[in-house]
Image: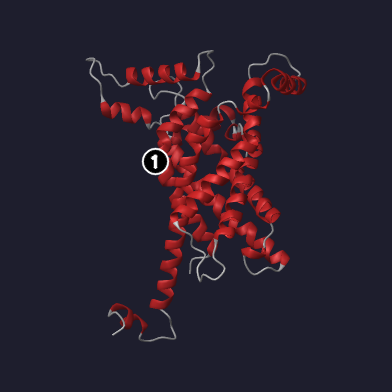
Amino acid sequence: MITPEITEGIAGLSAGFATTVITHPLDFFKLRLQLDTTSTSQWQAVHLIYKKLIKTSTNVNGGFSTSSFIAHLYRGIGSNLVGSTSAWAMYFYFYRRYKNSILALTRGSSDHHLKSYHYLCSAFLAGWTTSIITNPIWVIKTRMISTEKSQPGAYRSILHGIKEIYKREGLLGYYRGLTPAMLNVAQGAVQVSIYDLLKRSLVDPDASSEKLTTLQYVYASSLSKMVSTCLFYPLQVIRSRLQVVSGSNKLQSASKLCLAMYQTEGLLAYYKGLVPNLIRVVPATCTTFLIYEKVKHLLKLLALLSSIYWHPSLPFTRISFVSGGN
């Protein structure tokens, strides 16, 4: 019998796989933009990245190679798939485990007995656990996408990346960037907590199933993502601006920067670029959670049919099921 935790894990894995395949090209451009240190505007940087992509996809005879273009655009897809599928699988697995642990401690029988802070605590713990386990693959993925395959020192594969990091940096090399990743768990924790609370509010108390409609899942996932993004977006803006601040006292610079932004630009300064960011992340989030929910309910249905089909106390169940009950 498949446990609820395993069901959550498989659903998360499926959602991570599908979303990664669909959105990897966007991830390619996003990562290249994040690593761009020039003073060009965002759209100029996108244009330059695209021009470089076209150039690397042109063969020696000057002809454009579609297969080469796709290969470059999907460079690092292997590590991204491994990272995303394992991260989503583990996140939902541990999220269910931690919720079950809280239910056991509070002697509750279902998620309806959980408080909002229980959801938040479970989401934080699941996020931290997943970040620690999956950080090595994100290090490899970032380095693979940020380099061309022909570039000196570029990783040829995931295995090559694992060997090179251990050889040159030791075990600590696998955990570069872990601290920001752990801090970034907050946004995901808030998002998942709101998502679960929205789902619970949408369930009909008189219904025999907690399954929602596709539109309701899209509503819950998009709203939770928008709320969590809006709450934490000012931190992203401040962090981005601090990256161009010179001087060693970053804490003092941060406080001065926040005050200067408010005095010269107003509250809207903390939300510059919010709309383009939402346009990018909300559809991907809806896709992920919709696939996750559909796969989860499919697995539950299969488990139910399997229990009916092979029920030991009903010797004729299998025959009746196959013959349509006649």
* Residue 151 image offset from top left, x and y in percent: 41, 20
Side of 48 where 8 appears, left or right: right
Residue 209 lies left or right of residue 56; in this view the side is: right
Q: Is residue 12 visible?
A: no
The correct choice, above or below, for 68 with respect to 48 in the image is: below
Secondary structure state at the residue bearing disc 1: helix
Q: Quadrant of residue 267?
A: top right
Q: Which residue is mark 1?
A: 21
Which residue is more in the foreground, 126 or 252? 252
Q: Give the residue displayed 58% in from the left and 54% down from the top.
A: 198
Q: Is residue 295 above or below residue 241?
A: below
In terms of image quadrants, where is residue 76?
top left
Residue 197 percent location from the top left of the image: 61, 55
Which residue is located at x 55 percent, y 55 percent? Answer: 93
The structure residue drawn at horizontal position 54% and vertical position 71%, both measured from the top left corner, is 206
Image quadrant holding the C terminus, namely bottom left
Q: Is residue 308 visible?
A: yes
Q: Nearer the viewer, residue 175 or 283?
A: 283
In the foreground, 73 or 245: 245
Total of numbered circles in the picture?
Answer: 1
Q: Is residue 313 left or right of residue 39?
A: left
Colour scheme in the image?
A: secondary structure
Amino acid type, label 1: Val
Where is residue 72? Give x, y as percent: 36, 27
Give the answer, above or below, for where 323 lies relative to 106: below
Q: Residues within 10 Å of mark 1 (few under 14, many from 20)?
A: some
Closer to the camera in the image, 240 or 127: 240
Residue 262: horizontal and vertical position, in percent?
Answer: 71, 23
Q: Residue at x 60, y 35 (%)?
A: 175
Q: Is residue 152 above or below residue 175?
A: above
Quadrant of the rendered image containing residue 308: bottom left
